[in-house]
Image: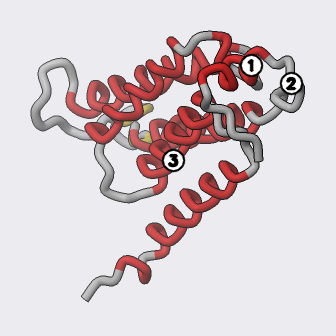
Amino acid sequence: RDSTWRNPIKVAAAAIVAWILWLQIGLPKTPHTVLLSLLAGYLAYFTFNAGVHENHLFIAMVLGLFLVTMPDELRTGWKRTHEWWLGLGVVAFAHLNPLLFFGWRGGDRTPTLLGGPEGLDISVPLALLSVVLFVVTVRCLRASGRGLSSSTSPARVCCEMAGIWHPM
Protein backbone atom coordinates (compact mmCIF):
# COMPACT_ATOMS: atom_id res chain seq x y z
CA ARG A 1 0.00 0.00 0.00
CA ASP A 2 1.50 3.29 -1.13
CA SER A 3 0.72 6.22 1.12
CA THR A 4 1.03 9.72 -0.30
CA TRP A 5 2.75 11.02 2.81
CA ARG A 6 5.43 8.32 2.67
CA ASN A 7 6.63 9.65 -0.66
CA PRO A 8 9.21 12.38 0.13
CA ILE A 9 8.74 14.14 -3.22
CA LYS A 10 5.02 14.59 -2.59
CA VAL A 11 5.70 15.81 0.93
CA ALA A 12 8.21 18.36 -0.42
CA ALA A 13 5.70 19.51 -3.07
CA ALA A 14 2.99 19.92 -0.42
CA ALA A 15 5.43 21.90 1.76
CA ILE A 16 6.25 24.24 -1.14
CA VAL A 17 2.56 24.87 -1.85
CA ALA A 18 2.00 25.52 1.87
CA TRP A 19 4.90 28.00 1.79
CA ILE A 20 3.23 29.86 -1.11
CA LEU A 21 0.01 30.03 0.90
CA TRP A 22 1.99 31.36 3.85
CA LEU A 23 3.51 34.06 1.59
CA GLN A 24 -0.01 35.10 0.62
CA ILE A 25 -0.87 35.99 4.24
CA GLY A 26 1.30 39.11 4.28
CA LEU A 27 0.39 40.34 0.81
CA PRO A 28 -2.42 42.73 -0.05
CA LYS A 29 -5.49 41.08 -1.53
CA THR A 30 -5.40 42.56 -5.02
CA PRO A 31 -6.10 40.89 -8.36
CA HIS A 32 -2.40 41.14 -9.18
CA THR A 33 -1.19 39.27 -6.11
CA VAL A 34 -3.96 36.69 -6.43
CA LEU A 35 -3.00 36.01 -10.05
CA LEU A 36 0.68 35.67 -9.15
CA SER A 37 -0.20 33.38 -6.22
CA LEU A 38 -2.27 31.15 -8.48
CA LEU A 39 0.53 30.98 -11.04
CA ALA A 40 3.15 30.24 -8.36
CA GLY A 41 0.99 27.48 -6.85
CA TYR A 42 0.32 25.93 -10.22
CA LEU A 43 3.99 26.04 -11.23
CA ALA A 44 4.89 24.46 -7.87
CA TYR A 45 2.42 21.67 -8.61
CA PHE A 46 3.90 21.16 -12.08
CA THR A 47 7.56 21.50 -11.11
CA PHE A 48 7.76 19.53 -7.87
CA ASN A 49 5.39 16.62 -8.48
CA ALA A 50 6.54 13.52 -10.28
CA GLY A 51 4.24 12.28 -13.01
CA VAL A 52 2.73 15.65 -13.97
CA HIS A 53 2.69 16.01 -17.75
CA GLU A 54 2.95 19.06 -19.97
CA ASN A 55 -0.78 19.00 -20.70
CA HIS A 56 -1.26 20.16 -17.11
CA LEU A 57 0.31 23.50 -18.08
CA PHE A 58 -2.84 24.65 -19.90
CA ILE A 59 -4.17 26.51 -16.84
CA ALA A 60 -0.72 28.00 -16.19
CA MET A 61 -0.72 29.32 -19.77
CA VAL A 62 -4.10 30.98 -19.22
CA LEU A 63 -2.85 32.53 -15.96
CA GLY A 64 0.32 33.71 -17.73
CA LEU A 65 -1.71 35.36 -20.48
CA PHE A 66 -3.94 37.05 -17.91
CA LEU A 67 -0.78 38.34 -16.24
CA VAL A 68 0.51 39.72 -19.55
CA THR A 69 -2.75 41.53 -20.31
CA MET A 70 -3.42 42.90 -16.81
CA PRO A 71 -3.82 46.70 -16.82
CA ASP A 72 -0.99 48.72 -15.31
CA GLU A 73 -3.38 50.30 -12.79
CA LEU A 74 -3.72 46.92 -11.07
CA ARG A 75 0.00 46.12 -10.98
CA THR A 76 2.44 46.60 -8.14
CA GLY A 77 5.99 45.52 -7.51
CA TRP A 78 8.31 44.84 -10.41
CA LYS A 79 8.21 46.41 -13.81
CA ARG A 80 5.61 45.18 -16.24
CA THR A 81 8.33 43.79 -18.53
CA HIS A 82 9.41 41.23 -15.92
CA GLU A 83 5.92 39.84 -15.66
CA TRP A 84 5.42 40.07 -19.41
CA TRP A 85 8.46 37.85 -19.94
CA LEU A 86 7.30 35.54 -17.16
CA GLY A 87 3.85 35.07 -18.70
CA LEU A 88 5.24 34.51 -22.17
CA GLY A 89 7.91 32.21 -20.73
CA VAL A 90 5.23 29.98 -19.24
CA VAL A 91 3.40 29.84 -22.58
CA ALA A 92 6.63 29.13 -24.49
CA PHE A 93 7.67 26.45 -22.01
CA ALA A 94 4.30 24.72 -22.29
CA HIS A 95 4.75 24.51 -26.07
CA LEU A 96 8.47 23.75 -26.05
CA ASN A 97 8.16 20.73 -23.80
CA PRO A 98 5.98 18.54 -26.08
CA LEU A 99 7.78 19.79 -29.19
CA LEU A 100 11.16 18.61 -27.90
CA PHE A 101 9.80 15.29 -26.67
CA PHE A 102 7.47 14.37 -29.53
CA GLY A 103 8.65 16.45 -32.49
CA TRP A 104 6.54 18.20 -35.11
CA ARG A 105 4.44 15.15 -35.97
CA GLY A 106 4.12 13.60 -32.51
CA GLY A 107 4.32 9.92 -31.83
CA ASP A 108 7.02 7.78 -30.30
CA ARG A 109 10.55 9.06 -30.59
CA THR A 110 13.89 8.12 -29.25
CA PRO A 111 14.94 10.28 -26.29
CA THR A 112 16.37 13.65 -27.31
CA LEU A 113 19.92 13.91 -26.07
CA LEU A 114 22.11 17.00 -26.06
CA GLY A 115 25.61 16.20 -27.27
CA GLY A 116 25.01 12.94 -29.12
CA PRO A 117 24.15 9.40 -28.04
CA GLU A 118 25.99 9.67 -24.72
CA GLY A 119 24.77 13.19 -24.02
CA LEU A 120 22.44 14.78 -21.54
CA ASP A 121 18.74 13.97 -21.74
CA ILE A 122 16.70 17.03 -22.77
CA SER A 123 14.45 16.61 -19.73
CA VAL A 124 17.22 17.87 -17.41
CA PRO A 125 17.48 21.39 -18.92
CA LEU A 126 13.68 21.52 -19.21
CA ALA A 127 13.36 20.68 -15.51
CA LEU A 128 15.84 23.45 -14.68
CA LEU A 129 13.84 25.88 -16.82
CA SER A 130 10.71 24.89 -14.92
CA VAL A 131 12.44 25.64 -11.61
CA VAL A 132 13.62 29.02 -12.96
CA LEU A 133 10.05 29.92 -13.99
CA PHE A 134 8.82 28.96 -10.52
CA VAL A 135 11.52 31.05 -8.76
CA VAL A 136 10.84 34.10 -10.96
CA THR A 137 7.11 33.78 -10.24
CA VAL A 138 7.73 33.69 -6.49
CA ARG A 139 10.04 36.72 -6.77
CA CYS A 140 7.34 38.61 -8.67
CA LEU A 141 4.82 37.57 -6.02
CA ARG A 142 7.01 38.82 -3.18
CA ALA A 143 7.70 42.08 -5.04
CA SER A 144 3.97 42.61 -5.63
CA GLY A 145 3.45 43.27 -1.93
CA ARG A 146 5.76 46.26 -1.99
CA GLY A 147 4.52 49.68 -2.96
CA LEU A 148 0.96 49.32 -1.70
CA SER A 149 1.54 50.90 1.68
CA SER A 150 0.92 54.40 0.40
CA SER A 151 -2.69 55.47 0.17
CA THR A 152 -2.05 57.05 -3.25
CA SER A 153 -0.74 53.94 -4.97
CA PRO A 154 -2.60 53.58 -8.30
CA ALA A 155 -3.19 49.88 -7.66
CA ARG A 156 -4.57 50.55 -4.19
CA VAL A 157 -6.82 53.41 -5.36
CA CYS A 158 -8.15 51.31 -8.25
CA CYS A 159 -8.78 48.31 -5.98
CA GLU A 160 -10.49 50.49 -3.36
CA MET A 161 -12.77 51.96 -6.02
CA ALA A 162 -13.65 48.45 -7.22
CA GLY A 163 -14.28 47.34 -3.63
CA ILE A 164 -11.63 44.61 -3.69
CA TRP A 165 -8.97 46.16 -1.45
CA HIS A 166 -8.75 44.39 1.87
CA PRO A 167 -5.90 45.70 4.04
CA MET A 168 -4.50 43.34 6.62
Whether residues under marks 1 and 2 lie with C-beta atoms below 8 angstroms apart, the answer is yes
Q: Amino acid at mark 2?
A: Ser
149 or 67: which is nearer to us?
A: 149
| Side of 159 relative to 57 (left or right) | right
User: First in sequence: mark 3 or mark 1?
Assistant: 3
Vertical side of 26 occupied by 9: above or below: below
Tell me what residue is drawn at x 51 percent, y 47 percent: 41
Q: Secondary structure at mark 1?
A: helix
Tell me what residue is drawn at x 39 percent, y 27 percent: 61
Tell me what residue is drawn at x 37 percent, y 59 percent: 50
Residue 3 in the image: state x and y as whole percent. Answer: 34, 83
| Farthest bottom residue in view | 1
Q: Where does label 2 land, which residue?
A: 151
Q: How is the image coloured?
A: secondary structure
Dot 3, crowdedness within 10 Å: few (<14), some or many (≥20)?
Answer: many
Q: Secondary structure at mark 2?
A: loop
